[in-house]
Image (cartoon, rainbow, N blue to C red):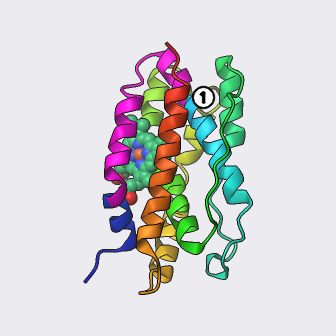
């Protein structure tokens, strides 16, 4: 029996995720955190614009990944930084690609628990500097819904390699956005 789509995508993107963890590092200074928020903004604003412009297949019903760009912009203002420029993100909008992109965007809320603790230790919280991380703490229900949707769409015809390719493209876009926005 083949593994669930989520496990397949997690395995296929493990290397890219590890690269991102390494690039982001310990986040133990305000400068590192500012760079993180700028990079995450440049990543999310472009990917969210792409998701907003997609025509979602019926199977997704009214479910959509929640956007973070607005909260990230408010966090940047708290930190005294202007929103950085973001390169547009573009790919075909087929169901496998949409599913791979959604997996990365929604799954990132799992790691956001750890990052929220680091932000709190630096003195930021849900009302200053870490609004986007606070909002991600409530996204477990969204993640469970996506896992259920992924089980439904994962028929024999579903193009798993294409979904993995899309997920890795998002990780690579995030890596580029993060490297371009480090604060030294
Ligand atoms: C743009 C940035 C990031 C994206 C897009 C992202 C994406 C993801 C995704 C898709 C998952 C779900 C994997 C799965 O279980 O299927 C995940 C989990 C996780 N991420 Fe990230 N991640 C990001 C940054 C980070 C960073 C910087 C860290 C570490 C400091 C991190 C730590 C984790 C951890 C610990 C988990 C597993 C949490 C758990 O299983 O409860 N992530 N992330």
Q: How many marks?
A: 1
Query: Compared with residue 95, is residue 75 higher up or lower down, i.e. above or below?
Result: above
Q: Which residue extends farthest left? A: 1
Question: Left or right: where does residue 71 sit relative to residue 12?
Answer: right
Query: Mark 1 sits on what residue?
Result: 38
Q: Which residue extends farthest bottom? A: 156
- Which residue occupies 68% across, 38% down? 71
x then y, percent, for residue 165: 45, 61
Residue in the foreground of this view, choosing between 99 and 71: 99
Question: Left or right: where does residue 82 sit relative to residue 131?
Answer: right
- Which residue occupies 70% across, 72% down? 62
Residue in the foreground of this view, choosing between 7 and 113: 7
Quarter of the image for residue 93 reads bottom right
Query: Compared with residue 174, is residue 106 higher up or lower down, i.e. above or below?
Result: below
Quadrant holding the N terminus: bottom left
x then y, percent, for residue 67: 66, 50
- Which residue occupies 41% across, 87% down? 156
Q: Give the residues drawn in magenta, as a range.
A: 12-36
Q: Is residue 69 magenta?
A: no
Residue 103 in sight:
no
Quarter of the image for residue 38 reads top right
Q: Which residue extends farthest top? A: 184
x then y, percent, for residue 100: 50, 63
Q: Is residue 31 magenta?
A: yes
Magenta span: predominant SS is helix
Badge 1 marks a residue whose secondary structure is helix
- Which residue occupies 70% across, 28% down? 83
Residue 118 in sight:
yes
Quarter of the image for residue 164 reads bottom left
x then y, percent, for residue 182: 51, 22
Residue in the foreground of this view, choosing between 103 and 85: 85
């Amino acid at each position: 029996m083949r593994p669930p789509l989520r496990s397949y995508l997690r395995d296929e993107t493990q290397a890219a995720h590890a690269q991102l963890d390494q690039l982001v590092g310990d986040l133990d200074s305000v400068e590192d955190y500012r760079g993180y928020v700028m990079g995450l903004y440049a990543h999310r604003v472009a990917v969210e614009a792409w998701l907003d412009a997609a025509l979602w297949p019926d199977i997704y019903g009214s479910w959509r990944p929640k956007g973070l760009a607005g909260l990230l912009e408010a966090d940047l203002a708290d930190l005294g930084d202007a929103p950085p420029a973001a390169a547009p993100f573009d790919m075909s909008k087929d169901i496998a690609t949409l599913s791979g992109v959604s997996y990365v965007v929604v799954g990132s809320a799992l790691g956001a628990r750890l990052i929220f603790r680091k932000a709190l230790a630096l003195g930021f919280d849900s009302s200053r500097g870490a609004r986007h991380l606070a909002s991600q703490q409530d996204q477990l229900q969204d993640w469970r819904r996506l896992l259920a949707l992924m089980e439904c769409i994962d028929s024999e015809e579903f193009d798993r390699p294409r979904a993995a390719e899309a997920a890795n493209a998002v990780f690579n876009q995030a890596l580029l956005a993060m490297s371009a926005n480090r604060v030294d």
